[in-house]
Image (cartoon, grey):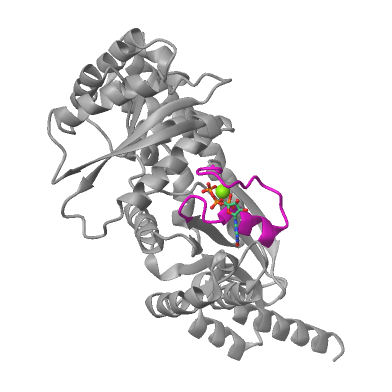
Amino acid sequence: MINIDSNKKEKVFIVSIIYKNNKNNNHIESTDELERLCDTADIEVVERIFQVLEKPLGATYLGKGKLAEIRDLGEKMDVKTLIFNDNLTPSQAKNISDITKCNIVDRTELILNIFSKHAKSKQSKIQVELAMLQYNYSRLKNMWKHLSRIEGGIGFKGPGEKQIEIDRRLIKKKITLLKSRLDKINKETLTKRKKRKDFLSISLVGYTNAGKSTLFNKLTSSKIYTADRLFATLDSTSRVFELNNGEKIAITDTIGFIKNLPTTLINSFHSTLKEVNEADLLLHVVDVSNREIYENIQAVNSILNDLEVDEKNILMVFNKIDNLDKIASKFLVKRLKIDYPNSVFISAKTNENMQELYDKIIYFAEKSSLNHKIEVPMELGKLISFIYDNSRVLKEEVNPKKNELIIETKIRNDLIGNINKQIEEYKILKKYK
Ligand SMILES: Nc1nc2c(ncn2[C@@H]2O[C@H](COP(=O)(O)OP(=O)(O)OP(=O)(O)O)[C@@H](O)[C@H]2O)c(=O)[nH]1
Ligand SMILES: [Mg+2]
Protein backbone atom coordinates (compact mmCIF):
# COMPACT_ATOMS: atom_id res chain seq x y z
CA MET A 1 0.00 0.00 0.00
CA ILE A 2 2.67 2.47 0.92
CA ASN A 3 5.18 2.72 -1.83
CA ILE A 4 8.55 3.05 -0.21
CA ASP A 5 11.67 3.64 -2.22
CA SER A 6 13.71 0.55 -1.46
CA ASN A 7 17.05 2.36 -1.00
CA LYS A 8 15.97 5.44 0.85
CA LYS A 9 13.70 5.70 3.89
CA GLU A 10 10.60 7.75 3.22
CA LYS A 11 10.44 10.87 5.39
CA VAL A 12 7.14 11.69 7.03
CA PHE A 13 5.45 13.88 9.62
CA ILE A 14 3.18 12.19 12.10
CA VAL A 15 0.07 14.16 12.91
CA SER A 16 -2.11 13.82 15.96
CA ILE A 17 -4.80 15.63 17.90
CA ILE A 18 -4.30 16.33 21.60
CA TYR A 19 -7.82 16.06 22.95
CA LYS A 20 -8.67 18.79 25.43
CA ASN A 21 -10.65 16.48 27.69
CA ASN A 22 -8.41 13.41 27.48
CA LYS A 23 -8.02 12.51 31.14
CA ASN A 24 -5.29 9.94 30.46
CA ASN A 25 -3.15 12.60 28.84
CA ASN A 26 -1.43 9.83 26.91
CA HIS A 27 -0.81 11.52 23.58
CA ILE A 28 2.96 11.09 23.96
CA GLU A 29 2.66 7.32 24.50
CA SER A 30 0.16 7.11 21.69
CA THR A 31 2.41 8.92 19.22
CA ASP A 32 5.39 6.90 20.48
CA GLU A 33 3.47 3.84 19.41
CA LEU A 34 2.67 5.38 16.01
CA GLU A 35 6.35 6.16 15.58
CA ARG A 36 7.19 2.51 16.35
CA LEU A 37 4.66 1.48 13.73
CA CYS A 38 6.41 3.82 11.25
CA ASP A 39 9.77 2.39 12.22
CA THR A 40 8.46 -1.13 11.63
CA ALA A 41 7.24 0.03 8.20
CA ASP A 42 10.71 1.49 7.47
CA ILE A 43 9.50 5.06 7.45
CA GLU A 44 11.49 7.89 9.03
CA VAL A 45 9.55 10.28 11.25
CA VAL A 46 11.15 13.73 11.05
CA GLU A 47 8.59 15.68 13.07
CA ARG A 48 5.57 15.15 15.29
CA ILE A 49 2.79 17.66 14.78
CA PHE A 50 0.00 18.18 17.30
CA GLN A 51 -3.07 20.34 17.47
CA VAL A 52 -5.08 20.76 20.65
CA LEU A 53 -8.76 20.29 19.85
CA GLU A 54 -11.94 19.20 21.57
CA LYS A 55 -12.77 16.89 18.67
CA PRO A 56 -11.71 16.48 15.03
CA LEU A 57 -13.16 18.98 12.57
CA GLY A 58 -15.64 17.27 10.26
CA ALA A 59 -14.29 18.40 6.89
CA THR A 60 -10.56 18.78 7.43
CA TYR A 61 -9.86 16.89 10.68
CA LEU A 62 -7.42 19.66 11.80
CA GLY A 63 -7.93 23.42 11.47
CA LYS A 64 -7.16 24.98 8.10
CA GLY A 65 -4.51 27.25 9.58
CA LYS A 66 -2.70 24.26 11.06
CA LEU A 67 -2.86 22.44 7.73
CA ALA A 68 -1.36 25.47 5.95
CA GLU A 69 1.46 25.42 8.53
CA ILE A 70 2.05 21.75 7.81
CA ARG A 71 2.16 22.47 4.05
CA ASP A 72 4.85 25.13 4.55
CA LEU A 73 6.89 22.96 6.90
CA GLY A 74 6.59 20.05 4.46
CA GLU A 75 7.95 22.17 1.63
CA LYS A 76 10.81 23.35 3.79
CA MET A 77 11.77 19.88 5.02
CA ASP A 78 11.02 18.04 1.80
CA VAL A 79 8.33 15.89 3.37
CA LYS A 80 5.52 14.75 1.11
CA THR A 81 3.63 12.38 3.35
CA LEU A 82 1.61 12.75 6.52
CA ILE A 83 0.79 9.82 8.77
CA PHE A 84 -2.28 10.40 10.94
CA ASN A 85 -2.66 8.78 14.34
CA ASP A 86 -6.32 8.15 13.63
CA ASN A 87 -8.58 6.96 10.86
CA LEU A 88 -9.81 9.54 8.41
CA THR A 89 -12.91 9.59 6.27
CA PRO A 90 -12.19 9.57 2.52
CA SER A 91 -13.36 13.17 2.23
CA GLN A 92 -11.20 14.33 5.15
CA ALA A 93 -8.19 12.66 3.52
CA LYS A 94 -8.97 14.38 0.22
CA ASN A 95 -9.43 17.82 1.78
CA ILE A 96 -6.23 17.53 3.83
CA SER A 97 -4.35 16.43 0.75
CA ASP A 98 -5.74 19.36 -1.26
CA ILE A 99 -4.55 21.88 1.33
CA THR A 100 -1.20 20.37 2.30
CA LYS A 101 -0.30 18.96 -1.14
CA CYS A 102 0.86 15.88 0.75
CA ASN A 103 -0.06 12.25 0.49
CA ILE A 104 -2.20 11.16 3.41
CA VAL A 105 -1.89 7.84 5.21
CA ASP A 106 -4.13 7.00 8.15
CA ARG A 107 -3.49 4.61 11.02
CA THR A 108 -5.35 1.68 9.46
CA GLU A 109 -3.46 2.07 6.17
CA LEU A 110 -0.16 2.07 8.03
CA ILE A 111 -1.04 -1.11 9.95
CA LEU A 112 -2.29 -2.79 6.77
CA ASN A 113 0.99 -1.91 5.10
CA ILE A 114 2.98 -3.59 7.90
CA PHE A 115 0.76 -6.64 7.74
CA SER A 116 1.26 -6.92 3.97
CA LYS A 117 5.03 -6.88 4.45
CA HIS A 118 5.04 -9.43 7.26
CA ALA A 119 2.58 -11.92 5.76
CA LYS A 120 4.43 -15.12 4.90
CA SER A 121 1.96 -17.97 4.52
CA LYS A 122 -0.62 -18.29 1.77
CA GLN A 123 -3.34 -17.90 4.38
CA SER A 124 -2.06 -14.68 5.94
CA LYS A 125 -1.28 -13.20 2.50
CA ILE A 126 -4.86 -13.74 1.43
CA GLN A 127 -6.15 -12.43 4.76
CA VAL A 128 -4.16 -9.21 4.38
CA GLU A 129 -5.07 -8.77 0.73
CA LEU A 130 -8.71 -9.20 1.60
CA ALA A 131 -8.50 -6.67 4.45
CA MET A 132 -6.81 -4.16 2.14
CA LEU A 133 -9.35 -4.59 -0.61
CA GLN A 134 -12.21 -4.18 1.80
CA TYR A 135 -10.71 -1.08 3.37
CA ASN A 136 -9.89 0.47 0.04
CA TYR A 137 -13.14 -0.44 -1.62
CA SER A 138 -14.91 2.66 -0.41
CA ARG A 139 -11.89 4.84 -0.95
CA LEU A 140 -11.07 3.98 -4.53
CA LYS A 141 -11.85 7.30 -6.11
CA ASN A 142 -9.79 9.26 -3.61
CA MET A 143 -6.87 6.95 -3.81
CA TRP A 144 -6.80 7.09 -7.58
CA LYS A 145 -6.53 10.86 -7.34
CA HIS A 146 -3.67 10.60 -4.88
CA LEU A 147 -1.82 8.15 -7.03
CA SER A 148 -2.04 10.16 -10.18
CA ARG A 149 -0.92 13.34 -8.47
CA ILE A 150 1.89 12.06 -6.33
CA GLU A 151 4.77 10.50 -8.13
CA GLY A 152 7.57 8.66 -6.45
CA GLY A 153 6.47 9.38 -2.89
CA ILE A 154 4.35 7.18 -0.70
CA GLY A 155 1.60 5.90 -2.90
CA PHE A 156 -0.38 2.73 -2.75
CA LYS A 157 1.38 -0.39 -3.76
CA GLY A 158 1.11 -4.13 -3.41
CA PRO A 159 -2.03 -6.14 -3.73
CA GLY A 160 -4.15 -3.03 -3.16
CA GLU A 161 -2.60 -0.90 -5.90
CA LYS A 162 -3.28 -3.16 -8.83
CA GLN A 163 -6.90 -3.25 -7.89
CA ILE A 164 -7.38 0.50 -7.74
CA GLU A 165 -7.20 0.78 -11.49
CA ILE A 166 -9.94 -1.69 -12.21
CA ASP A 167 -13.54 -0.95 -11.57
CA ARG A 168 -15.46 -1.63 -8.38
CA ARG A 169 -17.33 -4.54 -9.86
CA LEU A 170 -14.12 -6.40 -10.53
CA ILE A 171 -12.89 -5.69 -7.04
CA LYS A 172 -16.05 -7.11 -5.57
CA LYS A 173 -15.50 -10.21 -7.67
CA LYS A 174 -11.95 -10.45 -6.39
CA ILE A 175 -13.15 -10.15 -2.79
CA THR A 176 -15.56 -13.03 -3.37
CA LEU A 177 -12.80 -15.11 -4.92
CA LEU A 178 -10.38 -14.46 -2.05
CA LYS A 179 -13.07 -15.28 0.48
CA SER A 180 -13.72 -18.64 -1.13
CA ARG A 181 -9.97 -19.41 -1.28
CA LEU A 182 -9.68 -18.47 2.35
CA ASP A 183 -12.64 -20.68 3.24
CA LYS A 184 -10.88 -23.63 1.65
CA ILE A 185 -7.66 -23.03 3.58
CA ASN A 186 -9.62 -22.44 6.78
CA LYS A 187 -11.35 -25.80 6.36
CA GLU A 188 -7.99 -27.53 6.03
CA THR A 189 -6.63 -25.86 9.18
CA LEU A 190 -9.82 -26.75 11.02
CA THR A 191 -9.25 -30.43 10.27
CA LYS A 192 -5.68 -30.16 11.57
CA ARG A 193 -6.92 -28.39 14.66
CA LYS A 194 -9.49 -31.10 15.38
CA LYS A 195 -6.73 -33.68 15.36
CA ARG A 196 -4.93 -31.82 18.12
CA LYS A 197 -8.04 -31.86 20.30
CA ASP A 198 -6.82 -34.96 22.12
CA PHE A 199 -4.59 -32.67 24.16
CA LEU A 200 -5.37 -29.73 26.36
CA SER A 201 -4.79 -26.59 24.38
CA ILE A 202 -3.25 -23.27 25.35
CA SER A 203 -3.21 -20.10 23.25
CA LEU A 204 -0.88 -17.17 23.75
CA VAL A 205 -2.58 -13.83 23.34
CA GLY A 206 -1.46 -10.29 24.01
CA TYR A 207 -0.43 -6.92 22.76
CA THR A 208 2.05 -6.85 19.91
CA ASN A 209 5.68 -7.07 21.10
CA ALA A 210 4.70 -8.42 24.56
CA GLY A 211 6.98 -11.45 24.09
CA LYS A 212 4.47 -14.15 23.08
CA SER A 213 6.73 -15.78 20.50
CA THR A 214 9.72 -15.63 22.86
CA LEU A 215 7.67 -17.42 25.53
CA PHE A 216 6.38 -19.93 22.96
CA ASN A 217 9.98 -20.75 22.02
CA LYS A 218 10.91 -21.21 25.67
CA LEU A 219 8.00 -23.53 26.42
CA THR A 220 8.39 -25.65 23.31
CA SER A 221 12.14 -25.33 22.63
CA SER A 222 11.33 -23.93 19.20
CA LYS A 223 12.93 -21.23 17.17
CA ILE A 224 10.08 -19.30 15.63
CA TYR A 225 10.71 -15.70 14.59
CA THR A 226 10.77 -13.07 17.33
CA ALA A 227 11.76 -9.44 16.86
CA ASP A 228 11.69 -6.06 18.51
CA ARG A 229 9.18 -4.81 15.99
CA LEU A 230 5.42 -4.68 15.92
CA PHE A 231 3.45 -7.50 14.33
CA ALA A 232 6.42 -9.83 13.95
CA THR A 233 4.00 -12.77 13.99
CA LEU A 234 1.04 -13.03 11.63
CA ASP A 235 0.68 -16.78 11.25
CA SER A 236 -0.40 -19.12 13.98
CA THR A 237 2.05 -21.82 14.97
CA SER A 238 1.18 -24.79 17.18
CA ARG A 239 3.40 -27.30 18.90
CA VAL A 240 2.89 -29.97 21.49
CA PHE A 241 5.00 -29.85 24.64
CA GLU A 242 5.21 -32.17 27.61
CA LEU A 243 4.85 -31.18 31.24
CA ASN A 244 6.93 -32.76 34.02
CA ASN A 245 4.02 -35.06 34.85
CA GLY A 246 4.09 -36.41 31.28
CA GLU A 247 0.94 -34.63 30.19
CA LYS A 248 1.00 -33.30 26.65
CA ILE A 249 -0.25 -29.81 25.89
CA ALA A 250 -0.83 -28.19 22.50
CA ILE A 251 0.21 -24.54 22.51
CA THR A 252 -0.44 -21.91 19.86
CA ASP A 253 1.30 -18.62 19.22
CA THR A 254 -0.58 -16.12 17.17
CA ILE A 255 -0.93 -12.57 15.94
CA GLY A 256 -0.59 -9.73 18.46
CA PHE A 257 -3.18 -7.06 19.08
CA ILE A 258 -2.98 -3.27 19.15
CA LYS A 259 -5.25 -0.41 20.16
CA ASN A 260 -7.87 0.22 17.49
CA LEU A 261 -6.87 -2.84 15.51
CA PRO A 262 -8.61 -2.23 12.18
CA THR A 263 -11.91 -4.08 12.10
CA THR A 264 -11.27 -5.10 8.52
CA LEU A 265 -8.21 -7.02 9.80
CA ILE A 266 -10.13 -8.62 12.65
CA ASN A 267 -12.73 -9.77 10.14
CA SER A 268 -10.34 -11.32 7.67
CA PHE A 269 -8.13 -12.84 10.39
CA HIS A 270 -11.20 -14.22 12.10
CA SER A 271 -10.40 -17.88 11.49
CA THR A 272 -6.84 -17.41 12.82
CA LEU A 273 -8.24 -15.66 15.86
CA LYS A 274 -10.90 -18.30 16.34
CA GLU A 275 -8.17 -20.60 17.54
CA VAL A 276 -8.01 -18.38 20.61
CA ASN A 277 -11.65 -19.08 21.23
CA GLU A 278 -11.22 -22.82 21.19
CA ALA A 279 -8.27 -22.96 23.58
CA ASP A 280 -8.80 -24.46 27.04
CA LEU A 281 -6.51 -21.87 28.61
CA LEU A 282 -5.31 -18.47 27.45
CA LEU A 283 -2.01 -17.01 28.56
CA HIS A 284 -2.48 -13.26 28.26
CA VAL A 285 1.11 -12.06 27.85
CA VAL A 286 1.75 -8.47 28.93
CA ASP A 287 4.91 -6.39 28.61
CA VAL A 288 5.17 -5.25 32.22
CA SER A 289 7.79 -2.64 31.30
CA ASN A 290 5.49 -0.81 28.89
CA ARG A 291 4.21 2.50 30.25
CA GLU A 292 0.76 1.86 28.83
CA ILE A 293 0.35 -1.44 30.62
CA TYR A 294 -3.29 -1.02 31.74
CA GLU A 295 -4.38 0.46 28.41
CA ASN A 296 -2.71 -2.39 26.52
CA ILE A 297 -4.44 -5.00 28.70
CA GLN A 298 -7.70 -3.19 28.07
CA ALA A 299 -7.13 -3.18 24.29
CA VAL A 300 -6.49 -6.93 24.31
CA ASN A 301 -9.50 -7.60 26.54
CA SER A 302 -11.78 -5.65 24.29
CA ILE A 303 -10.72 -7.74 21.26
CA LEU A 304 -11.13 -10.93 23.32
CA ASN A 305 -14.55 -9.67 24.21
CA ASP A 306 -15.40 -9.22 20.52
CA LEU A 307 -14.26 -12.79 19.97
CA GLU A 308 -16.56 -13.87 22.80
CA VAL A 309 -13.79 -15.54 24.75
CA ASP A 310 -14.72 -17.07 28.07
CA GLU A 311 -13.08 -15.01 30.81
CA LYS A 312 -12.53 -17.62 33.45
CA ASN A 313 -9.70 -19.44 31.69
CA ILE A 314 -7.24 -16.61 31.34
CA LEU A 315 -3.92 -16.51 33.15
CA MET A 316 -2.19 -13.12 33.10
CA VAL A 317 1.51 -13.53 32.32
CA PHE A 318 3.41 -10.34 33.09
CA ASN A 319 6.58 -10.65 31.05
CA LYS A 320 9.88 -8.73 30.81
CA ILE A 321 10.28 -8.26 34.59
CA ASP A 322 14.02 -8.11 33.90
CA ASN A 323 13.35 -4.73 32.28
CA LEU A 324 11.96 -3.17 35.47
CA ASP A 325 14.14 -1.36 37.93
CA LYS A 326 14.00 -2.84 41.42
CA ILE A 327 12.11 -0.13 43.34
CA ALA A 328 9.53 0.64 40.68
CA SER A 329 8.89 -3.04 40.13
CA LYS A 330 8.05 -3.62 43.79
CA PHE A 331 5.14 -1.19 43.70
CA LEU A 332 3.97 -2.09 40.23
CA VAL A 333 4.01 -5.83 40.88
CA LYS A 334 2.16 -5.36 44.15
CA ARG A 335 -0.54 -3.32 42.45
CA LEU A 336 -0.88 -5.70 39.50
CA LYS A 337 -1.15 -8.69 41.85
CA ILE A 338 -4.11 -7.02 43.53
CA ASP A 339 -5.77 -6.15 40.22
CA TYR A 340 -4.99 -9.53 38.65
CA PRO A 341 -4.83 -12.23 41.32
CA ASN A 342 -4.53 -14.99 38.74
CA SER A 343 -1.16 -13.92 37.42
CA VAL A 344 2.55 -14.73 37.18
CA PHE A 345 5.51 -12.40 36.74
CA ILE A 346 8.22 -13.78 34.52
CA SER A 347 11.00 -13.03 32.12
CA ALA A 348 10.91 -15.22 29.05
CA LYS A 349 14.33 -13.87 28.24
CA THR A 350 16.17 -14.61 31.51
CA ASN A 351 13.90 -17.49 32.63
CA GLU A 352 13.04 -15.75 35.91
CA ASN A 353 9.98 -17.36 37.58
CA MET A 354 9.40 -19.72 34.66
CA GLN A 355 8.92 -22.56 37.14
CA GLU A 356 5.96 -20.73 38.66
CA LEU A 357 4.38 -20.50 35.23
CA TYR A 358 4.92 -24.25 34.65
CA ASP A 359 3.35 -24.98 38.05
CA LYS A 360 0.29 -22.92 37.19
CA ILE A 361 -0.07 -24.74 33.86
CA ILE A 362 0.27 -28.13 35.60
CA TYR A 363 -2.34 -27.11 38.18
CA PHE A 364 -4.69 -26.03 35.43
CA ALA A 365 -4.08 -29.23 33.44
CA GLU A 366 -4.87 -31.35 36.47
CA LYS A 367 -8.11 -29.53 37.10
CA SER A 368 -9.16 -29.74 33.44
CA SER A 369 -11.32 -32.34 31.84
CA LEU A 370 -10.84 -34.22 28.61
CA ASN A 371 -12.81 -36.97 26.90
CA HIS A 372 -11.59 -40.45 27.79
CA LYS A 373 -12.68 -43.97 26.96
CA ILE A 374 -12.40 -46.24 30.00
CA GLU A 375 -12.84 -50.01 29.87
CA VAL A 376 -13.89 -51.10 33.37
CA PRO A 377 -14.37 -54.73 34.41
CA MET A 378 -18.00 -55.25 35.49
CA GLU A 379 -16.80 -56.56 38.84
CA LEU A 380 -15.52 -53.11 39.81
CA GLY A 381 -18.95 -51.75 40.72
CA LYS A 382 -17.59 -49.18 43.16
CA LEU A 383 -15.24 -47.74 40.58
CA ILE A 384 -18.07 -47.54 38.04
CA SER A 385 -20.20 -45.55 40.44
CA PHE A 386 -17.21 -43.33 41.25
CA ILE A 387 -16.84 -42.55 37.54
CA TYR A 388 -20.53 -41.76 37.27
CA ASP A 389 -20.40 -39.53 40.32
CA ASN A 390 -17.29 -37.63 39.29
CA SER A 391 -17.49 -37.16 35.54
CA ARG A 392 -19.86 -36.44 32.72
CA VAL A 393 -20.61 -39.74 31.00
CA LEU A 394 -21.24 -39.36 27.29
CA LYS A 395 -21.76 -42.95 26.24
CA GLU A 396 -21.69 -46.45 27.70
CA GLU A 397 -21.58 -49.84 26.10
CA VAL A 398 -21.16 -53.41 27.36
CA ASN A 399 -18.50 -55.68 25.95
CA PRO A 400 -19.92 -59.13 26.87
CA LYS A 401 -16.86 -61.02 25.65
CA LYS A 402 -14.58 -59.32 28.16
CA ASN A 403 -17.34 -58.64 30.67
CA GLU A 404 -16.39 -54.98 30.63
CA LEU A 405 -18.23 -51.69 30.56
CA ILE A 406 -16.87 -49.23 28.00
CA ILE A 407 -17.50 -45.74 29.31
CA GLU A 408 -16.86 -42.63 27.26
CA THR A 409 -16.71 -39.71 29.62
CA LYS A 410 -15.44 -36.17 30.14
CA ILE A 411 -13.31 -36.48 33.22
CA ARG A 412 -10.73 -34.45 35.10
CA ASN A 413 -7.17 -35.33 34.19
CA ASP A 414 -6.01 -35.87 37.75
CA LEU A 415 -8.70 -38.56 38.28
CA ILE A 416 -8.08 -40.58 35.14
CA GLY A 417 -4.57 -41.70 36.14
CA ASN A 418 -5.83 -43.17 39.39
CA ILE A 419 -8.77 -44.93 37.76
CA ASN A 420 -6.56 -46.56 35.12
CA LYS A 421 -4.20 -47.68 37.88
CA GLN A 422 -6.99 -49.42 39.78
CA ILE A 423 -8.13 -51.22 36.61
CA GLU A 424 -4.57 -52.32 35.84
CA GLU A 425 -4.09 -53.64 39.40
CA TYR A 426 -7.37 -55.54 39.28
CA LYS A 427 -6.43 -57.18 35.98
CA ILE A 428 -3.02 -58.25 37.29
CA LEU A 429 -4.56 -59.68 40.47
CA LYS A 430 -7.14 -61.59 38.42
CA LYS A 431 -4.44 -63.12 36.26
CA TYR A 432 -2.68 -64.66 39.26
CA LYS A 433 -5.78 -65.84 41.10
N1 LIG B 1 13.96 -7.73 28.22
C1 LIG B 1 13.12 -8.64 27.75
N2 LIG B 1 12.82 -8.68 26.45
C2 LIG B 1 11.97 -9.64 26.02
C3 LIG B 1 11.39 -10.59 26.88
N3 LIG B 1 10.57 -11.40 26.15
C4 LIG B 1 10.64 -10.95 24.87
N4 LIG B 1 11.49 -9.89 24.78
C5 LIG B 1 11.83 -9.12 23.57
O1 LIG B 1 10.68 -8.40 23.13
C6 LIG B 1 10.64 -8.33 21.71
C7 LIG B 1 9.33 -8.88 21.19
O2 LIG B 1 9.29 -10.26 21.43
P1 LIG B 1 8.35 -11.24 20.59
O3 LIG B 1 8.43 -12.58 21.26
O4 LIG B 1 8.66 -11.17 19.14
O5 LIG B 1 6.95 -10.55 20.87
P2 LIG B 1 5.49 -10.97 20.33
O6 LIG B 1 4.54 -10.77 21.47
O7 LIG B 1 5.54 -12.33 19.73
O8 LIG B 1 5.24 -9.83 19.24
P3 LIG B 1 4.32 -9.86 17.90
O9 LIG B 1 4.53 -11.15 17.20
O10 LIG B 1 4.84 -8.69 17.16
O11 LIG B 1 2.92 -9.67 18.36
C8 LIG B 1 11.87 -9.12 21.23
O12 LIG B 1 12.91 -8.20 20.97
C9 LIG B 1 12.21 -10.01 22.42
O13 LIG B 1 13.59 -10.34 22.47
C10 LIG B 1 11.75 -10.54 28.28
O14 LIG B 1 11.31 -11.31 29.12
N5 LIG B 1 12.60 -9.54 28.63
MG1 LIG C 1 5.16 -12.93 17.86
| Above or below: residue 118 compared with residue 412 | above
Q: Is residue 399 visible?
A: no
Horizontal arrangement in the rendering, residue 110 relative to residue 89 (left or right): right
Residue range highlighted in magenta: 206-233
The quadrant where residue 110 appears: top left
Depth order, front residue of 53/390: 53
Horizontal arrangement in the rendering, residue 165 relative to residue 216 (left or right): left
Q: Residue furthest right?
A: 432
Horizontal arrangement in the rendering, residue 5 relative to residue 215 (left or right): left
| Above or below: residue 362 compared with residue 158 | below
| Above or below: residue 218 compared with residue 166 | below
Query: Which quadrant holds the C terminus?
Result: bottom right
Q: Is residue 208 magenta?
A: yes
Q: Is residue 419 visible?
A: yes
Q: Main secondary structure of the magenta part?
A: loop
Residue drawn at point x = 40 percent, y = 70 percent: 312
Depth order, front residue of 330/90: 330
Residue drawn at point x = 36 percent, y = 8 percent: 165
Depth order, front residue of 138/339: 339
Residue drawn at point x = 40 percent, y = 18 percent: 155
Depth order, front residue of 421/344: 344
Residue drawn at point x = 43 percent, y = 49 percent: 257
Horizontal arrangement in the rendering, residue 320 relative to residue 59 (left or right): right
